[in-house]
Image (cartoon, rainbow, N blue to C red):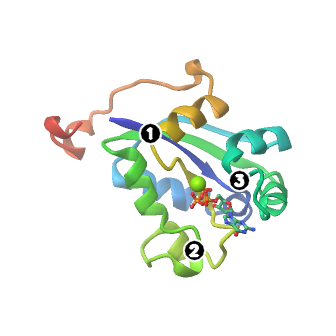
């Protein structure tokens, strides 16, 4: 099993899409092990988006991501990182496939509703930025046996 750090970005909160996005994640079979709402500060933004801080679009990205509350989640499941990236679609909503979150709900490259860790190293770096260890809850669900076989976990 893998864990991925997910954010519902300020546009998702403003557009009342958090329930829709959470519902898709739950229905897919991923397990929520952490969940909170918070404001991303400039410092947090620079930490999270360290790879983009020097890019020309960073000031706009910072303004956007700090503009209102976000919902942060840690989701867990088999290949959770790539499963989430596929569910999210490509960065630009206009180029995202239908059926993906960004393709179904967005037309923007910047305001693309959701963030998901792009690999295991990113997930390991990002999860502690948003969650203390005790905020991540390990629990079993009775449905787990129906989501995938033992050799896929
Ligand atoms: P994240 O899951 O948020 O990291 O998205 P991503 O991995 O699909 O894209 P990437 O890491 O390349 O960019 C991070 C975020 O910066 C994007 O999700 C957008 O919100 C924003 N972004 C990326 N490229 C641009 C750009 O050219 N202009 C602007 N304004 N924002 C951008
Ligand atoms: Mg990224």
Quadrant in the picture for the C terminus: top left
Q: Which mark is residue 52?
A: 3
- The Cα–Cα distance between marks 1 and 3, rounded to whole angstroms, is 18 Å
Residue 42 rendering spot, x and y as whole percentages = 84, 44
**95 up-or-down from 91: above or below:** below
Residue occupied by mark 1: 120
Query: Local crowd at mark 3 within 10 Å, few (<14), some, or many (≥20)?
Result: some
Secondary element at tag 3 = helix
Would residue 42 appear left or right of 126 to someone viewing this image? right
**81 up-or-down from 109: above or below:** above
Dividing the picture into quadrants, the one containing residue 127 is: top right
Give the residue displayed 51% in from the left and 75% down from the top. Answer: 103
**Residue most extreme to the top:** 134
Say whether disc 2 or disc 1 marks the residue closer to the N-terminus: 2
Q: Nearer the viewer, mark 2 or mark 1?
A: 1
Say whether disc 1 or disc 3 marks the residue closer to the N-terminus: 3
Give the residue displayed 47% in from the left and 56% down from the top. Answer: 23
**116 up-or-down from 37: above or below:** below
Secondary element at tag 2 = helix
Quadrant in the picture for the N terminus: top left
Give the residue displayed 50% in from the left and 76% down from the top. Answer: 96
Q: Nearer the viewer, residue 147 or 124?
A: 124
Query: Is the residue indicated by label 2 positioned so its CB lies within 8 Å of ligand 1?
Result: no
- The Cα–Cα distance between marks 2 and 1, rounded to whole angstroms, is 27 Å
Residue occupied by mark 2: 105
- The Cα–Cα distance between marks 2 and 3, rounded to whole angstroms, is 24 Å
Would residue 135 appear left or right of 81 to someone viewing this image? right
Query: Is the residue indicated by label 3 positioned so its CB lies within 8 Å of ligand 1?
Result: yes
Q: Which mark is residue 93?
A: none
Query: Local crowd at mark 2 within 10 Å, few (<14), some, or many (≥20)?
Result: some
Secondary element at tag 1 = helix
């Amino acid at each position: 099993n893998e864990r991925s750090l997910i954010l519902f970005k300020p546009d998702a909160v403003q557009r009342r899409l958090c329930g829709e996005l959470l519902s898709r994640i739950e229905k897919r079979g991923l397990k929520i092990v952490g969940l909170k709402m918070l404001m991303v500060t400039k410092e947090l933004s620079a930490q999270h988006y360290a790879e983009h801080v020097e890019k020309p679009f960073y000031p706009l990205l910072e303004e956007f991501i700090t503009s209102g509350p976000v919902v942060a989640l840690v989701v867990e499941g088999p290949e959770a990182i790539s499963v989430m990236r596929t569910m999210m679609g490509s960065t630009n909503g206009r180029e995202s496939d239908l059926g993906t979150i960004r393709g179904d709900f967005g037309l923007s490259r910047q305001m693309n509703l959701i963030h998901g860790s792009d690999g295991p190293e990113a997930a390991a770096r990002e999860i502690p930025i948003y969650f203390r260890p005790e905020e991540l809850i390990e629990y079993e669900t009775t449905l787990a046996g129906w989501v995938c076989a033992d050799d896929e976990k």
